[in-house]
Amino acid sequence: FYFLKYSSGSRYPNISLSSPLPGIPKPVFASVDGQEKYETKITTLENGLRIASQNKFGQFCTVGILVNSGSRYEAKYPSGIAHFLEKLSFSSTAQYGSKDEILLTLEKHGGICDCQTSRDTTMYAVSAEVKGLDTVVSLLSDAVLQPRLLDEEIEMTKMVVRFELEDLNMRPDPEPLLTEMIHAAAYRGNTVGLPRFCPVDNVDKIDRKMLHSYLRNYYSPERMVLAGVGIEHEQLVECARKYLLDVKPVWGTSTVANVDQSVAQYTGGIVKMEKDMSDVSLGPTPIPELTHIMIGLETCSFLEDDFIPFAVLNMMMGGGGSFSAGGPGKGMFTRLYLNVLNRHHWMYNATSYHHSYEDSGLLCIHASADPRQVREMVEIITREFIQMAGSAGEMELERAKTQLKSMLMMNLESRPVIFEDVGRQVLSTGRRKLPHELCDLISNVTSSDIKRVTTKMLRSKPAVAALGDLTELPSYEHIQAALSSKDGRLPRMYRLFR
């Protein structure tokens, strides 16, 4: 406006803003389709180690090593080794005398480190300034391949593990404990059904020799991915060649790795834990005494096409606590809210979960209520499972798909989440599906897909986990009968004396 108002007396009279200015170089505009710049680049080194990176604008990067190792591989070992290794991570190494030294080194680059273990993956990660990439990769290589595992560190870890196990049993939120129980029921004694947390009896059995034996088998380069977000791929490959190519691990190398190749065997079954929950949370507003039930059925692996319809179904079921604050986007229109929590005021919680692994999966519903209403609560859940096989309404299906896409995109705004996504996908499939590809797959899910996957799921035996006062809990056979019936009702029980 200023230019137009006063341009008549300038050197360029009557020049319109839409024609190029004389003497000025032609501008180069950024194209909207910048997909090729954001593809995940993958390189495999001579020793089998895969390097995956995703560029992202910013001064900080997240880099880490993901290993195909976790509690599912502990069939030939006492359970709890992966739990120990998680707690021992980033302790003293060949290069660093203590955890404090590692933290001080990272601090110079504004960095933090963390290690997380799941049933099938162990993840060592560092977030720091891009300038410190060389130090970060050197530190990661040292932490993963050269840990000292000193006697005092192992003793300290035993104390930490014991404390964690106590804490797990005393927490007001029993969700981690129930997840552990439902896996034990669904995959009895094999792979993902093996305990993720070290059992109390095994704490004293684990020593350096045993840890080295496990590491020798599972921490080999072909079972690892070095993933980075926010860095140039060539730079990361260069650092990997320098610090991860010809490194001899502290436990030595074995010619034949004794890797457990077992495929998850879904068994179904029930795991019960009678427990007094009356004093779980005392205080000015104590949580009432509750009995917690989780019922699950077998779904599919995350490598199968049906994984996406199951993810949509899980979103459609949704749910949460009865005291969740409402509002758009909070899942208040999901089935477990509309059909369960809004209709049965005495239900404290009803939430759907989907756990998926490379060879199996589990869709479960967790519910909690007063111990006297357990039977009724179980029937409500079995009825919800049966109703999943009915036809999904167009509106609720679209809502679930939109919510799933929105959740996916929102989570992938965060650098550590992109790192985990890149690492896990490349570790399990050798490539990465980009968010827009996943969104297309979600958009293509139809109501008949939901019906088809649900019908398949309902053919499996149920897995049941029950925690608390279980006096009113129906038998496993009755739960199984309800899930095989047309309406999901439990068989009627006639008692002479009530």
Image: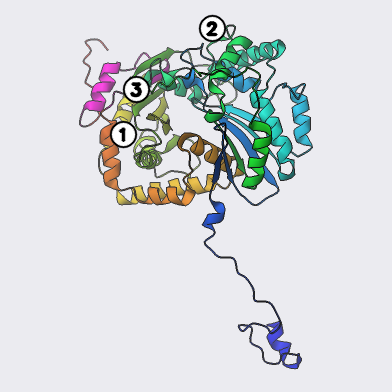
Give residue 218's position: percent from left, percent from top: 53, 22
Q: Tag 2's secondary structure?
A: helix
The span picked out in magenta is 460-486
Inspect this view and state whether residue 138 appears: yes
Q: Does 428 sit left or right of 81 as displayed? A: left
| Residue at left offset 64%, top offset 16% | 160
C-alpha span from label 2 to label 3: 26 Å
Q: Quadrant of the N terminus?
A: bottom right
Ranked by sequence position, the earlier of labels 1 and 2 is: 2
In the image, residue 187 lies in the stretch drawn in magenta: no
Q: Position of residue 253 (x, y in %)?
A: 59, 19
The residue located at (39%, 24%) in the rendering is: 294
The numbered disc on residue 201 is 2
Residue marked by disc 1:
384
Place of residue 97 in the rendered image (x, y in percent of width and height, measured from the top left): 77, 21
Q: Is residue 229 above or below residue 294?
A: below
